Image: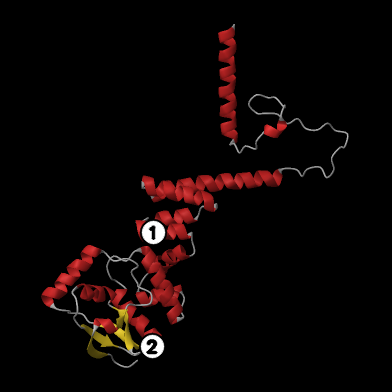
Amino acid sequence: MNPPVFQEIALALINEPDVAIRQAMDPAALEALAQSIRDNGQIHPLSVYPDGGRYTIAAGHRRYVALDMLGDRPARCLVYDSSTQAMLKIQIAENVHHEDMKPSDEAIWFARLMEGLGIDSTALADELKLNRNYIERRLALLGGDPRVFDAVAKHGLALGVAHELNDCKDPTHRVLLLDMAMHREATVATVAGWVAEFNAKGALEAKALEDTPPAAATLDPDAPPPLIACSVCGDSDEPWTLIHEWTHTRCAKLRDRMLGQAIERKVAAGA
């Protein structure tokens, strides 16, 4: 890798990075950075590389945005060659211990580094001087439910809560739990309890289906047809008006008990 060349470059000739390390930037922090550059000048140069007659940012994206807020002024840059691995090494050096990266931002960045450098999570952990589990927990977000990832990226859902939600085996129920977790600001322990309870019920239901003996292969042609009756009134007239109903067993029992009590009250009132 050749040493970088210092150069002042017009902002109009600089491209933002193909994949920004931070998917969102704090407006207040950007204002403060812009004010610092206005008062003290641009102390830290951008790291860029040539790209088809222009330059693309390898590191220093926030500085670029802050400079752009200040109007038409050139950016102080260190121009590197276009080696992909060299650019990724620069990003590592600038961002490994940088402030306020969301877990979702880190997940995208880690995945990009691994692909660009052709390394696994163990080697990346060595490069970044981080625990491998730290990296893999964030990478796991990319393999989970996209809606959970979106909640982390846009709404600040905690990483631990996100992992528990991704452990929910049913996608539909996972969305319900995600909504509950967001609105109730649930803790990791609370969400883990919700998920464990649902997964346990699902396992029991699956076991019950496995233990159910198979239906008879043939039906008795002389057997009377099954009685189709309304679950509320018990009558079987006008069967074409009957509807299919999804009901929890516990809810059906509650409904039957309430109907029974209503009938008893009606009988008592007429006595």
Q: Which residue is drawn at 15% across and 70% down?
A: 35
Quadrant (top left, top right, bottom left, bottom right) of the N terminus: bottom left
- Residue 46: horizontal and vertical position, in percent? 25, 81
Categorize mark 1 by other alpha carbons within 10 Å: few (<14), some (14-19), many (20+).
Answer: many
Q: Which of marks 2 and 1 is nearer the N terminus?
A: 2
Q: Where is residue 204 in the image (x, y as percent from the top left)?
A: 61, 44
Residue 127 tag number: none
Q: As drawn, which residue projects farthest toward the top?
A: 271
Classify 8 as above or below 166: below
**How many numbered circles are shown?**
2
Relative vertical location of residue 261 with respect to residue 58 in this rendering, above or below: above
- Residue in the foreground of this view, choosing between 87 and 93: 87
- Residue in the foreground of this view, choosing between 118 and 15: 15
Above or below, 264 against 230 in this view is above
> Callout 2, which amino acid?
Ser
**Amino acid type at mark 1:** Val
Residue linked to disc 1: 152
Q: Label 2 crowding class (10 Å Cα cut-off): few <14, some 14-19, many 20+?
A: few
Residue occupying the point 65% across, 28% down: 231
* Residue 153, x across and y down, in percent: 37, 61
- Residue 106, x across and y down, in percent: 37, 68
205 displayed left or right of 167 = right
Pick whichever, 201 or 35, lies toward us. Answer: 35
Q: In this view, does 240 lie to the left or right of 56?
A: right
Q: Label 2 belongs to which residue?
A: 83
